[in-house]
Amino acid sequence: MDVSRDQLQELYVNQGLSVRACAQILGMPTHGRMFWLMKRYGIQARPSKFQKGHQVTNKGRAPEECSNWKGGKQTVPCDVCGKQLERFPSLIYNHNFCGRHCYGQWRATNLCGRDNPNYGNSALAGERNPNWQGGISTRPYCFAWKDKEYKRDIMERDGFECRNPDCRKTSSNLVIHHLDYDKKNCHPSNLVTLCVSCNVRANYHREFWQSFYRLLQYYQLERN
């Protein structure tokens, strides 16, 4: 069936019918050809929520008269420090925090030991964990690792910043990372300063990150 522009204009634009309703009246498939005709005739499609019978407009209304008004921002206290926070109702949860520091303190108090929902879960413990490295996490560090000044010297060498050029900048806390993952190898050439986030990332795909930071150190030495 041939559909003219005037027919489509009358049904879709003037009467405000949906694409499906127009297709049923014109005896056409509900998908595909209707949109092709609309594009051909230069008729712009409407978002589905604005079809006839579903028009909702808040223009000119006071906030409390709008259909989705929930009272605006409300004041709730931070669960840790008590700081007053102004938040929309959709962003108010059972526990509210003013920042990561307070959230971390709350977790340390309420989600540790038997209070942790994963307490006693052995599904990914030991050799069943994909990051299992033979129990090296229990091995002791080298003697120099206890020297805070030694660690500070490493961070000073690295400019007190995360040395990962692809750092996501989600953490400002710095730690010292062992390139070969050997805790007893604390030679400066085996150590690099990373933020906590990048240090966690380095626990996955270890062969890649070891090569990555070795190559990075090589280029830094070449420039110096």
Image (tube, helix red, strand yellow):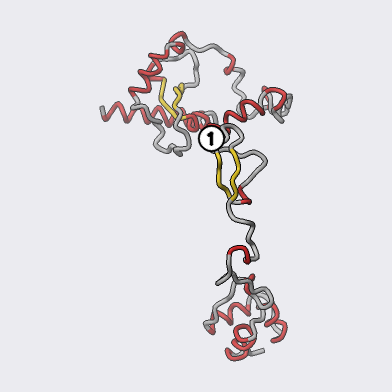
Determine which residue is flagged by label 1.
Answer: 100
Across and down, in percent, residue 146 comes to 46, 11
Q: Amino acid at mark 1?
A: Arg
Mark count: 1
Q: Which type of secondary structure does the marked residue at label 1 adopt?
A: helix
Horizontal placement of 98 versus 23: left or right?
left
Task: Please state the horizontal and vertical placement of residue 193, each as a whole percent of the image.
Answer: 41, 25
Q: Residue at x 55, y 37 (%)?
A: 83
- Which image quadrant is residue 145 in? top left
118 vs 78, left or right, is right
The residue lying toward the viewer, choosing from 193 and 16, is 16
Say which quadrant the N terminus sits in: bottom right
Residue depicted at 58% across the width and 82% down the height:
37
Which residue in the rendered view is the most extreme toward the top? 143
Residue drawn where x is 66% and y is 81% of the image:
17
42 above or below 156? Answer: below
Q: For this rendering, which residue is in front, 199 or 58?
A: 58
Q: Position of residue 210 (x, y in %)?
A: 46, 27
Say if 92 sits above or below 146 in the image. Answer: below
Q: Quadrant of residue 82?
A: top right
Near-viewer residue (195 or 103): 103
Q: Residue pushed farthest left? A: 224
Expressed as whole percent of the image width and height from the top left, the position of residue 207 reads 50, 29
